[in-house]
Structures are given as structure tokens and as C-alpha cells.
Image (spheres, rainbow, N blue to C red):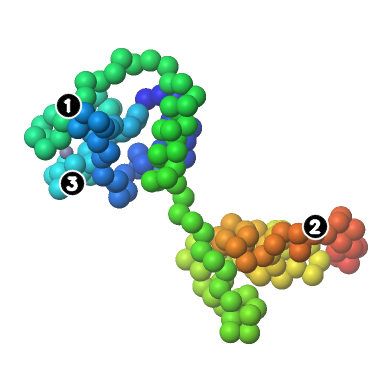
Amino acid sequence: MSAFLGHLPSFQRYLEGDNTLPNYDVDANGNIVLMAGEVFCRVPGCTSSNFKFSNTGNLRNHLKTHASVSLAPAKKAGRYTNESKMTIAAWYNQHFGPPAKPRIPFTVRGEISVKEVKKHLATKHVVTFPCGACASKQGAKCPITPYTCAYLTRYFDVAADFDKDDYPELDDIDVVAIEDDE
Ligand SMILES: [Zn+2]
Ligand SMILES: [Zn+2]
């Protein structure tokens, strides 16, 4: 396996298995296109579809047992160009990248729904409030202050509903004021 793949989070996810694998692309010669680093068989209905081969070479050997697919001979191993690295990384990111964050839930009155936000956070095992970021910012309400609350940022698509320019950073004076109160 190439070193650059080892550092790719989406590739790590792929290696963990249990993913929905995309169908093979077929090249102009009718051969399936294998991506660098692949170790799972993508032939639909394959009884080994959950089996992780120890390397792409072994996957290739397995693929030869499928009469339904044809495979081009392995290319000579060489250095990847930056362009091919980008293509490979984009493929893993597209199929095995992190799922999109959900939109922030709102009440019928157009306010962020604390109840629904907390419900979602609970599924992420976030049950302690406020978060560190809200605790250190005067006036911040956890978990509903956009661009302050770390929970909101981490688990919701804040940018879909709030413009960052509307939430300028509070300066350090606020933090000092809180410390003075203690
Ligand atoms: Zn197979
Ligand atoms: Zn918070």
C-alpha cells in the first residue's frame, strides 16, 4: 500500500469494512478499473464481499475467479504522480468520506431547537453542558450559539443556516470579565 493512502482518513474508513461499495467502472477495453489500495471485492453478489484481502494482489487473484469481470494485467508498480494521487484520494473521499453533518433543527418560531439539538448530541454521547468554548464566552448559550459552541460546530452544519460574518469573535475582555467574577 502506498504511503499517501495510509494517511487518508477515508481510506482508513474503507479498510474498516462494512461500507457500501460502488460498482466498478469499466475502461474502454471492457476491463474493470481497480483503484489503488483496494482490498474488497466489488462484484455484485460476491459471497466474499465482506472479506478483506490482505493486499490488492490477492484481491486481483480473487477477481480472476469471477467469470463476469475481466481485469487488465497489473501495471508495474511505480511512483504515483500527484495527479493520480489526487484522483485516488478523491475516489476514496467521495465514497468513504465522513457523512455530511445534519442541518440545525429549528422550532416553529424560527429559533434553534435546544431540545432537538440535545437529542442529536445525545446520540453522539454528548450530555455535559456547557462545552468548554461556551463556558469561556460571556453570553454564549450552550449548545445553541453559532460559531461559539463547539458541539454545534462539530455535529451540525452551522454554515448552512448562519453566516460567520454575523458572529464576530468576542474579544478577550469578555473572558477576563468572567474570571474576575469568580
Ligand atoms: Zn468477489
Ligand atoms: Zn457549547
Q: Are marks 1 and 2 in contact (CB under 8 Å)?
A: no
Q: Residue furthest bottom?
A: 109
How far from the left and from the top, in percent, is residue 109? 63, 84
| Residue at x 25% of width, y 20% of height | 74
Q: Assign the C terminus to one quadrant of the image.
A: bottom right
- What amino acid type is highlighted by mark number 3? Pro
Q: Residues within 10 Å of mark 3 (few under 14, many from 20)?
A: few
Q: Residue furthest front?
A: 28
Q: Quadrant of residue 127?
A: bottom right
- What amino acid type is highlighted by mark number 1? Asn
What residue does disc 2 label? 169
How far from the left and from the top, in percent, is residue 169? 80, 57
What residue does disc 3 label? 44
Q: Earlier in the sequence, mark 1 or mark 2?
A: 1
The residues bearing labels 2 and 3 have C-alpha atoms spaced at a distance of: 51 Å
How far from the left and from the top, in percent, is residue 23? 26, 44
Q: Earlier in the sequence, mark 1 or mark 3?
A: 3
> Is residue 65 depicted above or below 125 in this figure?
above
- What amino acid type is highlighted by mark number 2? Glu
Q: Assign the N terminus to one quadrant of the image.
A: top left
| Residue at x 15% of width, y 48% of height | 45
Q: Residues within 10 Å of mark 2 (few under 14, many from 20)?
A: few
Q: Are marks 2 and 3 in contact (CB under 8 Å)?
A: no
Q: Quadrant of residue 32?
A: top left
What residue does disc 1 label? 61
Q: Residues within 10 Å of mark 1 (few under 14, many from 20)?
A: few
The residues bearing labels 1 and 3 have C-alpha atoms spaced at a distance of: 17 Å
The answer to whether residue 122 is seen in the rendering is no
SS at mark 2 in the image: loop
> Is residue 21 depicted above or below 125 in this figure?
above
- Labels 1, 3: front one: 3
